[in-house]
Each structure stands twice: as structure tokens, then as C-alpha cells.
Amino acid sequence: MSINPAGMGFLSRLAHPGHFLAWSRGWIAPLSWIATALFALGLWLAFFASPEDYQMGGTVRIMYVHVPNAWLAQLCYAIMAVASIGTLVWRHPLAEVAAKAAAPLGAAFTAIALVTGSLWGRPTWGTFWEWDGRMTSTLVLLFIYLGIIALWRSLDDQGRAGRLVAVLTLVGAINIPIVKFSVDWWQTLHQPASILRAGGPSMPFSILAPLLTMTLAFTFLFLALHIVAMRTEIVRRRVDAMQRRHAAELGIEQ
Amino acid sequence: MSFLGEHWPYIAGAYTATLAAVAALIGWIVTDARRQKARLAALEAQGIRRRSDGTA
């Protein structure tokens, strides 16, 4: 990398892969500890300090893992979409790294949201699955994540893969508002928004508290994992570049 | 599990699935990080350096 950090602005300097490796190291442990503490508090609130819901009964506790993962499924994609703009417009290497590192995390959170949603739906709606707008668009989101991961892995030239993935990510971003607003646009089994809505959350504080605590816990977990995955991707690219250069010096065709 | 109510198998299933998926995710990310660091260390042990280090 031939960028000279001394000649760049503050944000550009922070985003330089070498500088990112240096400053991000100190963030992993604090983020992990905050996530652990929030999980402990959130699980205590979920199982011992919150009441059953008057409609859902005890299954409201499934919401404390389902909602955070559904939120992260969309947040990961939003981060990938912003990073894709950074890749296509500025060709910033850290944007590419951020997008690649977020994809498996987003796929995992989406899969968890789908599984926990199904396990909540069976006792509540009487079915594990219904092809309604929210569930179908979330399943499509999982397929988009898997397609993006497959594209990253199918090309050796990561620069070319990054640009192709960025285009695919931005095309797939049309699905995010569909996931979000599907419950308003179509008649669905899935209930409408109950936290991020005009007029504030439509639930009592005793249920909102564990929900928000678990959402924060999963978000801090995501931040810690994303930083580790980004650092790993930077090291992987360095190692690959070193191996290519060494092979070239030895006159080995790759 | 009776304190979870009559639907406890669904609640236990949801938390077990989440725990398993998160544990697998953390395990994969940590293993991958260690593998890449080991690759880098192996190259450096052979005296191979990055171009920006200027010592290869």
C-alpha cells in the first residue's frame, strides 16, 4: 500500500488499514466485556425479572433473542451497503474489508432471526412458517448474504471480487426497506413495528428493558466480532500479497 | 423448566439454537484470526517481509 498516512486527513488516517490494525486492537476487549455484562443483565431480566406477555405468555422471552438478531440482520446489510459505496466511489481498501467481514456475521444473525422466529410462531400462530412479506423478505435477505459470501470466495482477485460484490450489495439493498416496511405494506401474520414507531414503543417497560438490553448486548458482540474479522481480513490480504511477491521474486508462476 | 410455562420447549429451543450459532460464529472468527496470524508468523520466520518494510 503506497498511501502516506502523514499526508492524509484524520478520518482517512483512521481508516488506513495499517492504522486501523493499531487503534482497533484496544477496542476488542472493552467491547467484549461490555457485551458479556449486557448479556448477563439481559438474560437475568429476560428470565427472572420480566412478566409473561398477556397475549404471548412465556414465549415473549423468545423475542429477547429474535428481535436483536433481526435488527442486526438489517444493520449488517446497511453497513455493507455504505462500505460498498466506499469501495466503488473511493476504492478504499478498508471499505472492502469492512464489507467482506460483515457478510458472514449478517448471514448468521439472519439465520438466527429466522429460526427463533419460527420457534416463536409455532405456539403463537400455530405454524412454523408462513410465506408472508416479513418472513419471505428476511429469507431473501439470507439468500443475498449467502450469494455475497459465495461471490467473495469464488474469485482469487479480491479487488475485482470487491467491486462485483459492491454492485451486488447495492442492488440487494432494495430488500432492506422491503423487510422493514413489509408489515405496513401488506397484510401479514407478523405484527407491525412495536419499538421504532411513531408515538414510541408499544410495550410496557418491564418487557422493553430486557429487549433493549439484549439488543445492546448483541450489538456490542457484533462490533467486537466485526473488528476481529476485519483485522483478520487485513492480515490475510497482507499474507497473500507477501506470498505473491515472494513467488514472483523466485520466478514462480501463480 | 416449568417456570417458563407450557411452551418451554420452544423457548429452550430458541435460546439453545442462538447459543449454538453464536458459539460457532465466535469459534470460527477466533480460529480464522489465529490461522492468519500463524501464516504471517511463518512467512516472517522465513525472512519474507512486506514491500513497505523494505527488507525482503
Image (cartoon, coloured by chain):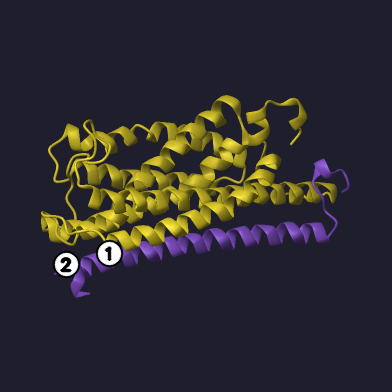
Q: Residue at x 63, y 30 (%)?
A: A11
Q: Depth check: A183 or A23 in front? A: A23
Q: Are marks 1 and 2 in contact (CB under 8 Å)?
A: no
Which residue is rendered at x = 19% and y = 41% of the image?
Answer: A202
Where residue A168 appears, as percent x and y from the top left, is 44, 35
Q: Which mark is residue A198?
A: none
Marks 1 and 2 sit apart, C-alpha to C-alpha, by: 14 Å
Residue A96 position, x and y percent, is 57, 38
Q: Colour of chain A?
A: yellow
Q: As rendered, which of A173 and A204 lies closer to the eye?
A: A204
The residue indicated by pointer 2 is B7
Question: Which chain does the purple colour mark?
Answer: B
Q: Nearest the camera: A166 or A177?
A: A177
* Residue A175 figure quarter: top left
Q: Which residue is mark 1?
A: A47
Q: Around disc 2, counting alpha carbons within 10 Å, would you say few (fewer than 14), some (14 to 19), or many (20 or more)?
A: some
